[in-house]
Amino acid sequence: MSLFIDPEIFVTFPGVILGVIVARDLDNQGNPEDVPRLAELLRAEEERVRTELAGATLSEHPRITPWREAYRKFGVTPKRATSSIENLLRRVLRGEEMRPINQLVDLYNVVSLRHLLPVGGEDLARIEGDVRLGFAGANEPPVTLLGEAEARPPHPGEVIYRDALGTLCRRWNWKEAIRTKLTAETTGAFLVLEALPPAGKEDVERALADLVALVSRFCGGRVEADLLDASHPELRWD
């Protein structure tokens, strides 16, 4: 199994970097003693964001603007959809608290807020074949996304993650498919951090190290990590 970035992605979005974690033998059920600690981490990052971004124009932030520009390049305006990091920040700045979902999702939300990068993940047991980040074709199968009742195909030309069965995440990091979502029963997962310039390699490395440490601390298991970019566009695992 592998995660592969199509060469066309680097042509349209030069400088894109992915930080990838592959984790196995995880305990995502959650130790009751860890529940308050994980909630504390989320509340701390939410409060930091509210303090540091108070009065800021979010659409002009250097970690948000590149994603807005990327979405426009594949035909999506901010009125129709925004990146996962912009969506997360807007919810926090409205005063929302991130509700607990499961250990892995809560942890990647902590890291996403802390480093202002989009982060997502999929259940390895629900993946079929290799995973590709690329542009959607004209005949992609319909996919049911989290929070949606009906399956719809991605639009041709939008950036998607897909496996042998179909789309895992639409509009790069907008919404994930129900089929491969992380659950409390997940024991194997791949997690992806995404960066567009001006965010660079060092930013991703810091966020990746942070997420590795948190997953190891709260979920145990075997965790490995790597960076993908134009010079190293594929990660393989057994």
Image: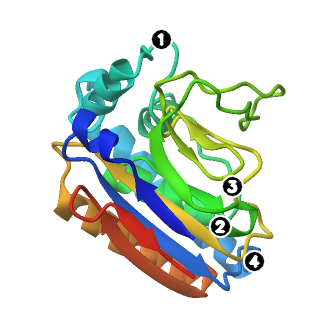
Q: Which residue is mark 1?
A: 79
- Whether 55 is drawn above or below 177: the answer is above
Q: Measuring 49% from the left and 40% from the top, which residue is drawn there? A: 173
> Badge 2 is on which residue?
103
Q: Which residue is identified by label 3?
A: 100
The kind of residue on which mark 1 rests is Lys
Image position, residue 100 (x, y; %): 69, 55
Q: CB under 8 Å between callouts 2 and 4?
A: no
Q: Which residue is mark 4?
A: 32
Q: Which of the two discs, 1 and 4, labels the residue nearer the N terminus?
A: 4
State the quadrant of the C terminus: bottom right
Cα distance, mark 3 to mark 1? 27 Å
Lower sequence index among marks 1 and 2: 1
Tell me the crowding category of disc 1: few under 14, some 14 to 19, or many 20 or more residues within 10 angstroms, Cα based.
few
Q: Nearer the viewer, mark 1 or mark 2?
A: 1
Tell me what residue is drawn at x 55 percent, y 57 percent: 131
Q: Nearer the viewer, residue 28 or 121?
A: 121
- Callout 2: helix, strand or loop? helix
